[in-house]
Image: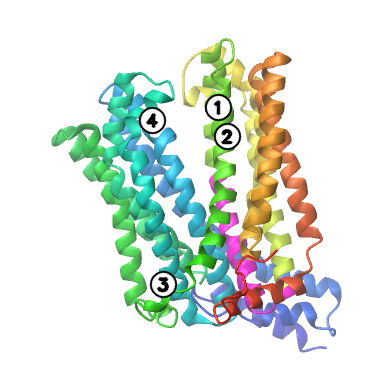
Amino acid sequence: MGSQPNVIDQAMIRSFRSSQGEPVSDELEWILNDPKLTLYRRLKAATWIELILLFKLAAPAIIVYLLNNVVSMSTQIFCGHLGNLELAAVSLGNTGIQVFAYGVMLGMGSAVETLCGQAYGAKKYDMLGLYLQRSTILLILTALPLTLIYVFSKPILILLGESTEISSAAALFVYGLIPQIFAYATNFPIQKFLQSQSIVNPSAYISLAALVFHLVFSWLAVFVWGWGLFGAALVLSLSWWFIVVAQFVYILVSPRCKHTWKGFSVDAFSGLGSFFKLSAASAVMLCLETWYVQILVLIAGLLPNAEIALDSLSICVTIQGWVYMISVGFNAAASVRVSNELGAGHPKSASLSVVVVTLSSLILAVIAAIAVLVFRYDISYVFTEGETVSNAVADLAPFLALTLILNGVQPVLSGVAVGCGWQAFVAYVNVGCYYFVGVPVGALLGFTFHLGAKGIWSGMLGGTFLQTLILLWVTYRADWDKEVENAKSRLEAWDDKKEPLLLD
């Protein structure tokens, strides 16, 4: 008994010093199962180790998502200096067309998180490269029909009620984003491939370099070379290809990937049907969440005095989006940690990971919510002038604060679902909670009961709250020993093609 603390301390030190890309250790599961330690001692040591592992994943992941967001946002800022028409065109092209493709590609790429994470935990390293190639093939095939949406973006936008002038300018911008679709198709599988091995720092450095590259060439394209909207979009596409090429070069030359990348293989073309089912479920799960907020913003545009409602709602949604990036980082960390531990056959470690990552994200979300309430009369002035909008944002601040708290939990639980392979189930939950509860209730409160933006946001809160409760209950009731067996079955599915990748 006397030697146990030293052993645990050594395990903590190893977790702190461990580099990214190392195999999943058995030490955490050993500590949680050690009968010689008291329950308090086991939980204290294991929680400390899990926190170290978690934040080494989450912090760089948050940076990656924030930097990638700034890349897209900076294009909008540069084009905004060309005129109001150009700003409207970029905003419409991004929110109306580009976000749709982004959601589909990111969602489908999430299948790699499940399979690569579990394979890495099970030390089936050679399968990671095959999963990466299979996902890339499927996403490139999916990008082909998505390209048609970009090509015919002008008539689509006009059909949706936009003016011909703005639709023409937005279509010009969207044409320059066509190469970006295929960058998404290759970037997201590569990104998830690296994340599943806990390799996240290189992606953060590459994203920072891409941002610098993007800012320099966007300035040249817009202000020096005079390439306009089309040129700005081409630079944005090129910046994403910069990220893709840099990450793939890292995979080729880094010793951390020597066991997981064995080169291109014709085996990548086998089993695409089963892989597509998991990828499609992942895409539906993510897109239903992404479109939910967009639909509610569109509904707000139909309200009386829509300008104030849209301004206040847009400001709150923007703040929510930035704070959401933190939760998305924890989402990625949760997916990696849970899938790794399940693949390694560590049910107690997987369960602990869920608790630690959820509580960590929730604490940060509560801090952000308190900040919103304290500065509710001031935050609107970062975006626009005017006391009317400031008061409208202050009225929505309590709803925004509650949303931030829920977003501290819900995306993390979605990451747990990805790590476990529950994407199909969560897709059904999203349909019911968001589109049969959230949107109808929001419209009812906003229009019938004349609550305006508050009513619409209340509907969104209700749908998100219901979804979070269901995911909490399912996660709480999860049999982690069974999930370990499901992970093994999923990995063995490539040896038995009759066995589905997407387990019920």
Colouring rule applied to residues: rainbow
Regarding residue 84, the answer to whether it shows in the image is: no
Q: Earlier in the sequence, mark 1 or mark 3?
A: 3
Can you say whether 382 is above or below 309 in the image? below
Marks 3 and 4: in contact by CB < 8 Å?
A: no
Q: Earlier in the sequence, mark 1 or mark 4?
A: 4
- Residue at the extreme left of the image, as rendered: 225
Residue that mark 2 sits on = 293
Range of magenta residues: 324-347
Mark 4 vs mark 3, CA separation in Å? 34 Å
Residue that mark 3 sits on = 269
The amino acid beneath tag 4 is Ile
- How busy is the neighbourhood of tag 1: few (under 14 within 10 Å), some, or many (20 plus)? some
Residue that mark 4 sits on = 156
The amino acid beneath tag 1 is Val
Mark 1 vs mark 4, CA separation in Å? 19 Å
